[in-house]
Image (spheres, helix red, strand yellow):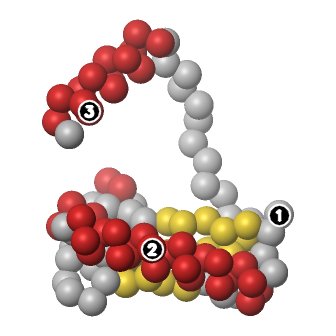
Amino acid sequence: MNPGHALVVVKPHRANIYELDDDLASAAFRTAARVARAVKKAYGCEGVTLFQANEPAGAQTVFHFHIHVLPRWEGDGLALAWPAKNPPREALEEMAAKLRAVI
C-alpha cells in the first residue's frame, strides 16, 4: 500500500484471531505496537492503520493470522470507511448485553 507497509505474523499456524490464545494474542498486538512506532519513526508518516481480517466475510484472504501495519499520509488513497448507522441507545444497550452474556 505505502512504503513501510509491514506485517506482524504469528509463528505457529493459526488461521484467524479465534484460534489465538491470550498469550499469543497479547504478543502479536505488543509486537504490532512496537512495529507501528518503528514505522512512524522510520518513514515519518502522518498516521498508522492496523488492519486484521477474519474469515471471508471479514475480508480475510490469507488464512494465517497476521496484522498489517500501514503507514498513512493524508490523501494516500486508502479508504477504510463504512456508513454510520447511529442505532438508538436501547439497541446499543441490547448489543452490549449480548456481548456481556458470552464474555
Could you tell which of marks 3 and 1 lies nearer the N-terminus?
1
Q: Quadrant of the N terminus?
A: bottom right
Vertical side of 90 occupied by 84: above or below? below
Q: Secondary structure at mark 1?
A: loop
Instruction: Name the foreground residue: 27 vs 84.
Output: 27
**Which residue is rendered at x = 70% and y = 87% of the image?**
3
The three-letter code of the residue at mark 2 reads Arg
Which residue position is annotated with label 2?
Answer: 30
* Left or right, residue 8 beside residue 34: left
**Which residue is rendered at x = 31% and y = 83% of the image?**
10
Q: Secondary structure at mark 3?
A: helix
On the question of residue 80 being in view, the answer is yes
The three-letter code of the residue at mark 1 reads Glu
* Mark 3 and mark 2 residues within 8 Å of each other at the beta carbon: no
Instruction: Name the foreground residue: 97 vs 1.
Output: 97
* Mark 1 and mark 2 residues within 8 Å of each other at the beta carbon: no
* Mark 3 and mark 1 residues within 8 Å of each other at the beta carbon: no
Could you tell which of marks 1 and 2 lies nearer the N-terminus?
2
Q: Nearer the viewer, mark 1 or mark 2?
A: 2
The three-letter code of the residue at mark 3 reads Leu
Which residue position is annotated with label 3?
Answer: 99
Q: Nearer the viewer, mark 3 or mark 1?
A: 3
Label 2, residues with CA under 10 Å away: few <14, some 14-19, many ≥20: few
